[in-house]
Image: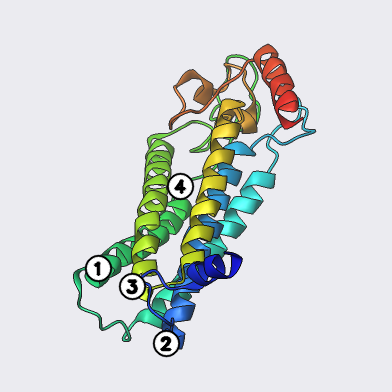
Amino acid sequence: MGAEFLGWFCTPLSGAADHHLPTWAAWHGRAMVFAWAVAFPVGVLAARYFKVVAGQDWPDELDNKTWWHWHRVLQGTGVLVMTVGCCLAVGHAQDTTGIAQMHRCIGWGLVASAWLQILTGVLRGSKGGDFPRQGETSRDIGLGGDHYDMTRRRKVFEYVHKVLGLSALLVAVAAIILGLVLADAPRWMAVVLASWWLVLTSLAIRWQRAGRCIDTYQAIWGPEPIHPGNRIPPIGFGIRRYSREGWRQSAGRMVRTRK
């Protein structure tokens, strides 16, 4: 039984006797899977759920940049690896079947969306935001910024960045599935990827329920209403805002959840 299962597990999806791919196709697939199934989703989880980390005395200790460093490194690495993988396929992909054409169209759309994310990040505006006194704004003391003041430019960036990022990740799942079918990949690849996505989804649900999706603005500047961004609704779904007392209670639940 064990040998039979191992044989089935290593057999291509179509049931063919063997599996062979050109070198360019094999490395194209590896690059795209790394970018869209590993680097990008892990970078999104870091940005969404680790703006306040264990041991940080928020809101007395603000603007912990751990999430930002991980997000920047993972997304930047993903874009570079994705671009290399894309270049490997240029001039080689000659399959004209419907699945192949759909895979190419979705793939080029994903490549464009990833580079658009880089562009919107560059154009997101300034950060700004020291801690003005009561009755002052950051612009009164010359420290205004697009993020601190939540200007229209910053709001547009957040809507585009969050909606496009999540949509691209969901579409990437379809692109990878199509790629596995086109490559007639061994069944173990599909099982491993499905298991990996299940793990990521489970972690996201767990951390969301634990209240770890704290608003970026509050993570940086705290919950006080003197800050202009705290007087408008957060941009995005499932984002939590806390008072000092509310955070203490939530932090206690998080500790219990980790245990």
| Mark drawn on residue 124 | 4
Above or below for 195 versus 110: above
Q: Secondary structure at mark 2?
A: loop
Q: Nearer the viewer, residue 15 or 40?
A: 15
Name, please, the residue furthest toward the top. 245
User: In the rendered structure, which amino acid carries the disc numbered 3?
Assistant: Leu
Instruction: Give me the residue at 78% from left, 27% from top.
Output: 57
Q: Horizontal and vertical percent for residue 175?
A: 35, 61
**Is there a contact, CB below 8 Å, between mark 3 and mark 1?**
yes
**Looking at the rendering, which quadrant does residue 206 occupy?**
top right
Above or below for 219 versus 179: above
Instruction: Give me the residue at 64% from left, 37% from top.
Output: 51
Q: CA distance from mark 3 to mark 2?
A: 12 Å
Q: Horizontal and vertical percent for residue 20?
A: 43, 84
**Looking at the rendering, which quadrant does residue 211 occupy?**
top right
- The residue to which callout 2 is attached is 22
Q: Nearer the viewer, residue 100 or 164?
A: 100
Q: Residues within 10 Å of mark 3 (few under 14, many from 20)?
A: some
